[in-house]
């Protein structure tokens, strides 16, 4: 997960608390010593209890797929080996203030684009038609209209206007919405068991 | 003559001893300050710890190891894509914002767990 480590213009330095909460990692912040839950991004003890860090969009993907989309990427100076994790094991999650939704990666890969509504806001989860190891969560509100997305071949298209978009960054590529952009939302990947623990009221697509 | 030499020796011994004590004290103080600035290694003792303070912790909280026993990467270093030397198939966590994109190998994140970083000027925390 990736969080913005900033609250009220104060930059936080966070370390590893060395504890589990709900079987997931915890942090501590160097100024107040408060303890934070990683999946919630929220302080669970200490002076900052109840404060929450903003989630940022992040991808779990392969190095090859990431480079295809971001040729100018920087890489952490570290040894990179195969991990024991694979994208298909995860849920893609959007954690709102009042509602949390998960989509299984195989569902997203099969559907190409899933049009959904979270907290009353139209959203779409998109598997990159050029590489199914990449995905994005977008808002479907573009200006004063709502788009309905589908993938067709290697294209991400709005069914309603025929406009096409870059499936990674969301900017318009052709059609009436050429000058518009899909807003990227802070989706992240979670293990299904963590989803059940931290968002027990969360729902997984398709709604039963 | 012997007495004078003995006095000189005693003075020298005292001076060396004093220097040793002052030096050791300074080293300990510097080491502690360095730890307080989070660049030290090993467990860190912060200004406040809700566990040590006996604060009520939520159900499901389990302390496993001391703070920073799994040491976060506080000062990450980056190379360009060509310099990474990773196989295309390895799993990474990727983030981009503005003009900057960064990738972190999952195999390394599972060992270090936390990277305290910045992205296009925004302070971020990457965690696994």
Image (cartoon, coloured by chain):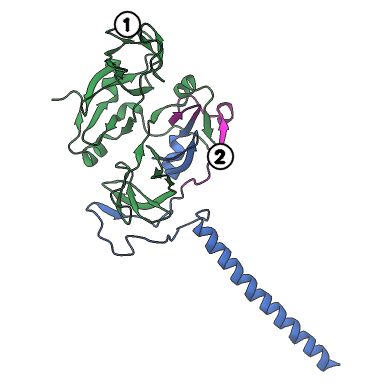
Q: Which residue extends farthest right? A: B1
In the rendered image of this protein, which colour is used for chain A? green
Is A135 in the magenta?
Answer: no
Q: For mark 2, does the 10 Å Cα neighbourhood hold few (<14), some (14 to 19), or many (20 or more) residues? A: few
Q: Nearer the viewer, mark 2 or mark 1?
A: 1
The residue under label 1 is: A162
Q: CA distance from mark 2 to mark 1?
A: 44 Å
Q: What secondary structure is found at the residue carrying circle 2? A: loop
Q: Depth check: B122 or B12 in front?
A: B122
**Quarter of the image that includes the C terminus of chain B:** top left
Q: Residue A56: x percent and y percent? A: 37, 34
Q: Residue A111: x percent and y percent? A: 27, 16
Q: Is residue A83 visible?
A: yes
Left or right for B12, reference A71: right
Q: Residue B125: x percent and y percent? A: 42, 41
In the rendered image of this protein, which colour is used for chain B? blue
Image marks 2 and 1: residues in contact by CB distance under 8 Å? no
Label 1 marks a residue whose chain is A
Is B100 in the magenta?
Answer: yes
The residue under label 2 is: B77
Please report the residue visible at 51 percent of the width from the left and 59 percent of the height from the top.
B35
Label 2 marks a residue whose chain is B
Q: What secondary structure is found at the residue carrying circle 1? A: loop
Please report the residue visible at 56 percent of the width from the left and 67 percent of the height from the top.
B29
Q: For mark 1, does the 10 Å Cα neighbourhood hold few (<14), some (14 to 19), or many (20 or more) residues? A: some
The range drawn in magenta is B72-101
Please say if B110 is above or below A15.
above
Q: Depth check: A10 or B97 in front?
A: A10
Q: Is residue B92 visible?
A: no
Q: In the rendered image, which quarter is residue A207 located in?
A: top left
């Amino acid at each position: 997960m990736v969080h913005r480590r900033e609250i009220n213009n104060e930059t936080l330095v966070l370390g590893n608390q060395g504890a589990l909460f709900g079987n997931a990692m915890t942090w501590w912040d160097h100024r107040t010593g408060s303890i934070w839950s990683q999946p919630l991004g929220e302080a669970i003890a200490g002076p900052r209890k109840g404060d929450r860090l903003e989630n940022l969009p992040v991808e779990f993907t392969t190095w090859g797929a990431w480079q295809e989309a971001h040729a100018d990427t920087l890489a952490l100076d570290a040894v990179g080996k195969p991990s024991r994790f694979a994208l298909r094991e995860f849920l893609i999650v959007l954690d709102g203030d009042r509602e949390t939704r998960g989509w299984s990666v195989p569902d997203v890969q099969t559907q190409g684009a899933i049009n959904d509504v979270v907290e009353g806001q139209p959203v779409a989860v998109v598997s990159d038609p050029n590489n199914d190891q990449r995905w994005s969560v977008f808002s479907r509100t573009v200006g004063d209209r709502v788009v309905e997305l589908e993938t067709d071949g290697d294209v991400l298209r709005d069914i309603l206007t025929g406009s096409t978009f870059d499936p990674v960054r969301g900017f318009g590529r052709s059609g009436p919405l050429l000058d518009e952009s899909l807003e990227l939302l802070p989706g992240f990947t979670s293990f299904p068991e963590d989803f059940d623990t931290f968002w027990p009221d969360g729902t997984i697509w398709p709604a039963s | 003559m012997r007495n004078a030499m003995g006095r000189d020796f005693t003075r020298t011994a005292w001076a060396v001893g004093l220097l040793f004590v002052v030096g050791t004290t300074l080293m300990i103080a510097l080491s502690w300050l360095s730890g307080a600035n989070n660049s030290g290694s090993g467990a860190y003792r912060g200004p406040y710890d809700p566990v040590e303070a006996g604060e009520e912790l939520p159900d499901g909280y389990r302390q496993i190891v001391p703070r920073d026993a799994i040491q976060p990467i506080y000062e990450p270093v980056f190379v360009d894509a060509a310099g990474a030397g990773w196989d295309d198939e390895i799993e990474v966590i990727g983030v981009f914002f503005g003009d900057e994109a960064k990738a972190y190998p999952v195999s390394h994140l599972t060992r270090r767990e936390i990277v305290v970083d910045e992205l296009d000027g925004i302070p971020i925390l990457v965690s696994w």
